[in-house]
Image (spheres, grey):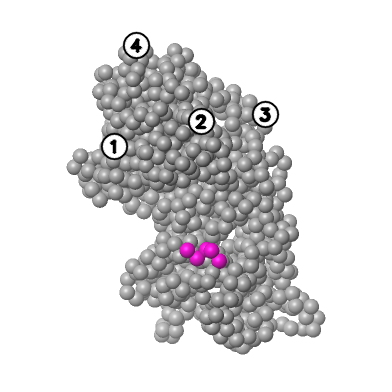
Amino acid sequence: MTDLEAALRRAVRGEVGFDVTSRALTTMDASNYRRVPLGVVAPRDADDVAAALEVCREHGTPVVARGGGTSIAGQATGTGVVLDFTRHMNRLLSLDPGARTAVVQPGLVLDRLQEAAAPHGLRFGPDPSTHSRCTLGGMIGNNSCGSHSVAWGTTADSVRELTVLTARGRSLRLGRDWAGAPQGLRELVDGDLARLRTGFPDLPRRISGYALDALLPERGADVARSFCGSEGTLGVLTEAVVRLVEAPRARALAVLGYADEAGAAEAAAGLLPLGPLTVEGMAVDLVPSTRGLPRGGAWLFVETGGDSDAEARARAEAVVRAADVVDALVVTDPAGQRRLWRIREDASGTATRMPDGAEAWPGWEDCAVPPARLGGYLRDFRALLAAHDLRGTPYGHFGDGCIHVRVDFDLLTDAGVARFRRFSEELADVVVAHGGSLSGEHGDGQARAELLPRMYGEETVDLFERAKGVWDPDDLLNPGMLVRPAPLDANLRFSVLPREPVHVEFGYPADGGDFSAAVRRCVGVAKCRTTSVTGSGVMCPSFRATGEEEHSTRGRARLLHEMLAGELVTDGWRSTEVRDALDLCLSCKGCRSDCPVEVDMATYKAEFLHHHYAGRRRPAAHYTMGWLPVWLRWASRARVAPVVNALASVGPLAAVAKRLGGIAGEREVPRLAGETFSRWWRGRGGPRGEGEPVVLWPDTFTEHLSPSVGRAAVRVLEAAGLRVVLPPTLRGRAVVGDGTSKSALALPAARRGRVCCGLTYVSTGQLDRARAVMRRTLDLMAPVLETSAPVVVLEPSCAAALRTDLPELLHDDPRAARLAARVLTFAEALERHAPDWAPPAVDRPVTGQTHCHQHAVLGDAADRRLREAAGLTGELSGGCCGLAGNFGFEDGHYGVSVACAEDQLLPAVREAPAGAVVLADGFSCRTQLEQLAGVRGRHLAEVLAEGLEQRPE
């Protein structure tokens, strides 16, 4: 233990982490930069902050204050001690509806403040797209804005008082009329009044540099406002009094379509006199699909408010009438508005990939110019991109003249980094020529501070340095930011990654087969740190259960990044730090769809486990749960299901078996079916009818544990006029196969087993075994692949494995992609192959949860339509059930598994109306419901089959 670490542990009551994991999790924010800290401190209160500052001052160690870590300019990284305010100093201390103020701690997430203010008809004005995970302290440090800044301004406009600690331990209460000003600050301002009155651009989004002009006497000498945007370089915030605004009772959204981006930009300023709440813009090159948007090549999102829906709509329609548009759309439905806003909020992530898959990065993320000059600036910006052979997708706050953009810089080669520097210098000159600010929202950090002399001149920058000296004479707080900055092309986070592709098993088709590129997908916007799920969202259940960064998708990606870098995490694939962080990953695949850049942590986890345990003994659960298809098949062939069930019901025997098998003692072992699905199928005589053939996949769970689901599916599919067949168990000359042929010539193939998607082997990282199982399956499916018959898979996790894991693991076998393309869910099969069939009218409410793999990989649109046609009303919850295949059964996971279920699924079931059908298409979901709530969940096929039995012929 170092002297610094020991001193901090003695002085601070909060957590002190100098371990590899704690440091690795904070090497980066959402920028291009990386710095390795010495350690991380999570202070419990202001006294802890003061104690940590005193220790660091004595040791000459820099200090960086960090909130949600979503800063885009590098200011939330540092080489000293990081203060993490999200763990303890994250409370709303008070809220006064009459005064419209709130007292908050720096680690409070913005959405928590909004939730507390909403019942009073109030809200905090600024709302960055990261509102679900950014903190008030970070917003104050960066002077954040958000889409509603045309109505409610920047964070500085919403700050009343700030309590800060200086690096030398003095507590100051900052406010107007020089309240809390450190000694020497007033003299500094009085000595340069002329420069402060003339040297700062007058525009709504001027964030760059220190806001020293807020200290002018005619502006109230507001020390708190001047502190905003100082990026943790002047003092450490411990408490803030913020102003709240009245929230409109109703809102409408006018989406205005323009021919191109310049047209939208030039129109934005003209809409401001109408008093909109937002004027946001984006062009077609940012939008994955224009479905739901009006015609055009660019759009403005103009939100209006009112005391009633009619008033809000009238104002939106007035905006449409005043705008010269190609097409327009007014949306008053809250759900419809959320869907449209999600496109804009995810842009900070989606913009990191160009349409052709090329990577794009921040660095010139948020320049701002006077709104009236935005059109001209965008034309010059596009021209500069073309001159440097670069591409970017601008979007952002058109009403404030602030543009966000990710550019496809090559930050991996010396030549590419040199071009990044040249472009940055030239763009800074373009911004200044248009009277703009290098930063219009996210701060200067390391990305732009070096170029501040181009915007302000050397004299004003010298004034910034002197102001820093007044507040922090020892240069202890976040050195290298804003003043005396590091070069903008130093400390790039990509420089430590391997230049040659890493040998991996999966194909990573979206990343050119490069595992490093796959890991680079995580840009740190931290949507995975959201603490509540909206709609059918899933990501990230383990973070919501533990609240720990290492159990978020971003945290795991950071550890994988450091594993590849080899500086902090030095033992590569054998890393215990990475293993432990991935241990609580449920492999729910939620990040594959919910992460704006589609990080696929389930695949990364399987890849890591494969290498980590290569040539070594695995955990017992990998053999029991990973090889589950084998054990169940043996039990079926030996016809010992009744014996196994009887033994599992004997407590002491079950306890020993679970302990030996690495299974959580709290879990009950699921009962094996007395008759497998295939045995029932053979008993009924195989296929019936003459309709279009569909191949029903006998997945392991349906086959051995829930054959009632398979029987129900056969009943419904046949009622819809389809001819159900099973995939051939044996290779032979069957046209499609019925799972029953047993010729003598086929006996050797029979010993190789039945078709299997390989899911359990993939989820436990046994990729060699998974590949062998998948290749055998492709051999067995050869007769099916020679036809055009669809493959209907009832278990969502198995369908997802066939759609994604199969072609990505067997990327060298063209048959894998062919089979993946054939896979349909139960609802998709009915919709596509029996479009005229009407399901029975069940006419009951539903509750339950959309399977996480269905949400992430398969989609549930067809299921929604089928439920609606059957009169099954209501919405299913999001999140993950928490059992997630082998995860919830493994020893040590039970607590997190239950917490995940309590997040969405169990509350939804408890609050369901009387008589509601509990839908759960996944075996894991049904098992979790039964074991935790004593509730029987049912597959949609079972519900429809029951409806058929009750429907008069």
| Residue 942 point in image, percent of width and height | 48, 77
Q: Quadrant of residue 268?
A: top left
First in sequence, mark 3 or 2: give its number. Answer: 2
Q: CA distance from mark 4 to mark 1?
A: 30 Å
| Residue 632 point in image, percent of width and height | 63, 77
Question: Which label was assigned to residue 834?
Answer: none
First in sequence, mark 1 or 3: give its number. Answer: 1
Q: CA distance from mark 4 to mark 2?
A: 34 Å
Q: Secondary structure at mark 3?
A: helix
Q: Which residue is mark 2?
A: 59
Residue at x 58% of width, y 45% of height: 20
Q: Secondary structure at mark 2?
A: helix
Amino acid type indicated by mark 2 = His
Along the line of sight, which residue is nearer the eye, 710 or 672?
Answer: 672
Q: Which one is closest to the eye, mark 1 or mark 2?
A: 2
Magenta segment range?
A: 891-895
Q: Quadrant of residue 737?
A: bottom right
Q: Secondary structure at mark 1?
A: strand
Residue neighbourhood size for the residue with mark 1, other residues' Cα within 10 Å, grouped as few (<14), some (14–19), many (≥20): many
Amino acid type indicated by mark 1 = Val
Q: Secondary structure at mark 4?
A: loop
